[in-house]
Image (cartoon, grey):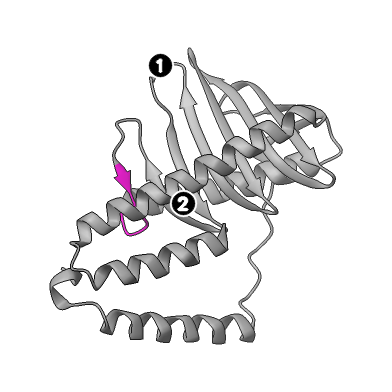
Amino acid sequence: MKKTLIVLLTVFITQLSFGQSMDELMKTWNSEIVRIGDREKEKIDIEILDLSLVDKELLSTHYSKGTLKIYRQNESIRKLVKTYTRTDTTFTESYYFLGRWPLYVEISHSKQRLPDKFYFDKSNLMLWIDVNQNEYTVENDKSSQWWWKLAESIDKLTLAANSKEKTINEDKIKLPEPQPMTKEDSLQIIELKKQFDQLMKTVPDSLKK
């Protein structure tokens, strides 16, 4: 998926030179993210038909009847499905993985017609499509809030999935403190920022608004 998004970025930059508006380019970009994400999600759903399933019971003061379904390919988690009930509403959260990174997340409940859909490139939330089919990218405040919520949920459910216990109290799962950034990571971020700044110099001012 990383290679595909690099190709998309190249196409995106090329299209700028043909005078397309930023809105038109973003629609194209978002539709490609959806196409790639949906294709990978469908591949995983086909793959897990032949995988063994592990069920765990989830406990929490925030919900009842919690379950976690775990699909693995060798040692790698391919999909996690969390279901739980809050008052009279049943929620389903489906997490798809590409290696150790999230690829796609879908969250629905029994009283809404469509799910919230979240598309990722590795650890970055690329696109959120809400139940009303509105599209939000990373600069949107609500999308940013969702990213932190999903990141925490993914970490907790991964720990629960890797636990030897069959019953997990989600309230008691403690996430490890984040590791300090390495010098290599810091230098890479600085280099990426320089590349981004150089790229933005090639974009006409009229398209930056």
User: Is residue 156 highlighted in magenta?
Assistant: no
Q: Which of the pair 27/169 is nearer the observer?
A: 27
Q: Say if 121 sits above or below 157 in the image.
A: below
Q: Are marks 2 and 1 in contact (CB under 8 Å)?
A: no
Q: Which numbered circle lies on residue 147?
A: 2
- Toward the left, the furthest residue is 206
Q: Main secondary structure of the magenta part?
A: loop
The residue stretch that appears in magenta: 135-140
- Toward the top, the furthest residue is 88
Q: Residues under labels 2 and 1: Cα distance?
A: 23 Å
Which secondary structure lies at badge 2?
Answer: helix
**Residue at image x 78%, y 39%?**
72
Please provide percent x and percent y for residue 157.
Answer: 67, 41
Quarter of the figure with residue 41? top right
Looking at the image, residue 47 sits to the left or right of residue 188; the answer is right
User: Is residue 137 highlighted in magenta?
Assistant: yes
Of the 4 image quadrants, the one containing the C terminus is: bottom left
Kindly identify which residue carries mark 1.
Answer: 111
Looking at the image, residue 209 sits to the left or right of residue 116; the answer is left
Mark 2 or mark 1: which comes first in sequence? Answer: 1
Q: Amino acid at mark 1?
A: Lys
Q: Say if 192 sits above or below 86 in the image.
A: below
**Residue at image x 39%, y 45%?**
128
Please provide percent x and percent y for residue 159.
Answer: 73, 46
